[in-house]
Image (spheres, rainbow, N blue to C red):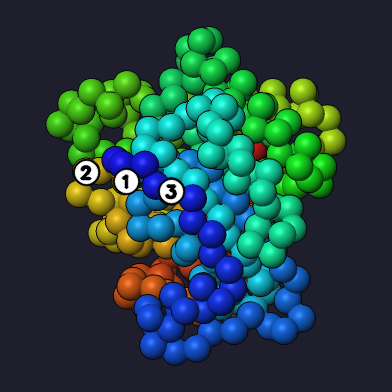
Amino acid sequence: MNSVSPILWSRRKLLHAALVACGCRLYAADDAPHVRILFLGNSYIAHNGLPAIVGELLLSSGVLAPHIGSYMQGGYKLGQHAVDPEALALLKQGADDGKPWDVLVVQEQSVLSAVAAIQPEAKQLMNNGLTRLVTLARTVNPKMLIVDLQIWARHENLWKERSPDALSTGTSPEVAHARIRLANVSAVQAALEKNPGASILVSPVGDFWKLVHENFPALPLYAEDGTHPDMLGSMLTGLVVAGTIGGREVIEKTTWIGECPFDQVERVKKVLLDHPEVFKNAGK
């Protein structure tokens, strides 16, 4: 995937995007607190424009008024973001209103996210990458919330096809998911040890992907490659991230569905709302 330049979304730009996508006007409540969110990741975030999706969901909920920024590079690891001049410049620059970011959403590279659970060198690489980003974020805003986006396991068909990438993450989707979960917990613990008092949350995206896929296997979460998200998969990811940042109320009140069928989005939202324990147990 080609690199993606930094994208800044103000409330006005988000509103314009909503007008184009939905043909209707969407407003954040006048008294909704503003939240400034920066995304650092790779193609998993860039695919279908996840940062903008999260912005639309927050905006239509009326719970938070979002300012969104993003920097994505194909295949990037967190450690690479931590030394990338453009990523660091955007982190220091802050949001479009001149204020520092309130939230930093970070996403580790997919294979490393699983391998880090079993290989000491990979574990150190993932832990160091997250720790360094947390440290850098807190120099910009000591109260910044760090959201660690836990990714999903690849589609089971890739194991049937003996895909090298899938097999490198585990012997099955279940094993891959367990490894991803463990590696994220370990990375957050390591970051907290070096940054006591930091605010870090694991956004249980992978947990909900597994749950939705088990309950509704026909829903098109995956793109054709079995790795990246289809539009509904990005919607599911966006709902989990938005819920991690703004709470259950965001999921309940958001009305934006983008290009996804209404009934599919409602099924996904119901799974999220029916399983608050997944959010509660994230990172444990």
Q: Residues within 10 Å of mark 1 (few under 14, many from 20)?
A: many
Point out residue 97 in the picture as x, y percentages from the top left corner: 69, 64
Instruction: Point out the residue furthest to the right here.
Output: 197
Q: Secondary structure at mark 1?
A: loop
Point out residue 240 in the picture as x, y percentages from the top left corner: 54, 56
Q: In this rendering, does residue 267 appear at all?
A: yes
In depth, the one of 168 and 19 nearer the eye is: 19
Residue 5, labelled with which disc? 3
Q: Residues within 10 Å of mark 2 (few under 14, many from 20)?
A: few
Q: Are the residues at dot 2 and dot 1 in contact (C-beta closer than 8 Å)?
A: yes
In depth, the one of 212 and 50 nearer the eye is: 50
Of badges 2 and 3, the one in the foreground is 3
Q: Secondary structure at mark 2?
A: loop
- Report the amino acid beneath label 2: Asp
Circle 1 residue:
228
Q: Residues within 10 Å of mark 3 (few under 14, many from 20)?
A: few
Q: CA distance from mark 3 to mark 1?
A: 20 Å
Relative placement, left or right, of 73 versus 91 is: left
Point out residue 277 in the picture as x, y percentages from the top left corner: 63, 52
| Of callouts 3 and 1, the N-terminal one | 3
Instruction: Point out the residue furthest to the bottom here.
Output: 24
Q: Secondary structure at mark 3?
A: strand
Circle 2 residue:
225
| Of callouts 2 and 3, the N-terminal one | 3
Point 29% across, 51% down: residue:
222
Q: CA distance from mark 2 to mark 3?
A: 24 Å
Point 53% across, 39% down: residue:
86
Point 30% across, 56% down: residue:
230
